[in-house]
Image: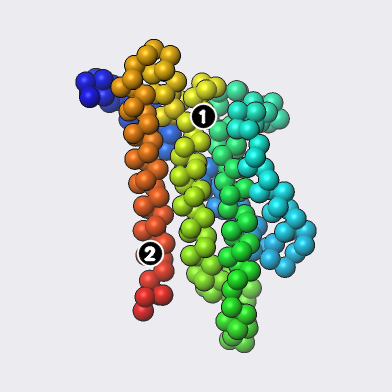
Amino acid sequence: MNWLIHNYAWVLELLGQHLVIAVSAIVVALVISIPLGRAAVNSAFGRGLVSVVGAMYALPSLALLILVPVIIGTPLRSSLNMVIVLSIYGVAIMAGPCVQAFSGLPEQVLLSADACGYGRLRRWWQIELPLALAVIASAARVLVTSTISLVTVAAFIGISSLGTLLTDGFQRGISAEVITGLVVTIILALLLDGLVALAHWLLSGWRRV
């Protein structure tokens, strides 16, 4: 506790950096995965692409963190590299469930929307997305907790995050620092998971009517 009291400003700074990287990657993954999942429903190529993307989760994170800056020319310690790598993992997690979410929509409801004169975009936004939200939200909760934990890997190549508390604590033999890093990371993951669950509950109010 004494260590945290004397270093809380640094912990808050690392928490902010951790959060920026994680939230950026989560948003990018969702923005890519949801349209990709919908587009793949009626496309054999799209489904094949989703399968390939899903397999990318097996790629080692440290290897990607070294490969990405070589490809795009960013500094090795740039947080952008971490955002890109986590976005790749995020799409790998989300793409498959998004396909399943849109594939399982009731055909009767979609035909009724067409009969009522809904255009493709309006039908997707007002009918398909709300119906698919339950499956997407479940996958998003996995995405959030996975991303929060993976951001800690950034510390191994010098990118500041809550993982810095783990690496620095291990190197200097400060157990309080390591425990602080673990506890704050877990609390952050639980809080963001709760926010996703709350957002799903609020957006699904029409189901409770």
Task: Name the residue at the top extreme.
Answer: 172
Please, is residue 63 above or below residue 148 in the view?
Answer: above
Dot 2 lies on which element? helix
Q: Nearer the viewer, residue 199 or 165?
A: 165
- Viewer can see residue 8: yes
In the picture, measured across the screen, residue 95 lies left or right of residue 47, that is left
Using the image, tell me which numbered label, if any, was put on residue 117. Answer: none
- Viewer can see residue 121: no
Quadrant placement of the N terminus: top left
In the picture, measured across the screen, residue 155 lies left or right of residue 117, that is left
Quadrant of res 112: bottom right
The spot of residue 29 in percent (x, y) is: 57, 48
Residue lying at 65% horizontally and 28% vertically, measured from the top left:
63
Question: Which residue is the site of mark 2?
Answer: 201
Please, is residue 38 above or below residue 10 in the view?
Answer: below
Q: Nearer the viewer, residue 71 or 138?
A: 138
The spot of residue 206 in percent (x, y) is: 40, 75
Question: Which residue is the site of mark 1?
Answer: 153
In the picture, measured across the screen, residue 133 lies left or right of residue 183, that is right
Question: First in sequence: mark 2 or mark 1?
Answer: 1
Query: Label 2 crowding class (10 Å Cα cut-off): few <14, some 14-19, many 20+?
Result: some
Using the numbered discs, state the Cα–Cα distance from disc 2 to disc 1 in whole angstroms: 32 Å
Quadrant of res 172: top left
Amino acid carrying label 1: it is Val
In the picture, measured across the screen, residue 107 lies left or right of residue 205, that is right
Please, is residue 37 above or below residue 125 in the view?
Answer: above
Residue lying at 37% horizontally and 75% vertically, measured from the top left:
208
Residue lying at 62% horizontally and 54% vertically, measured from the top left:
95
Question: Colour mode?
Answer: rainbow
Amino acid carrying label 2: it is Trp
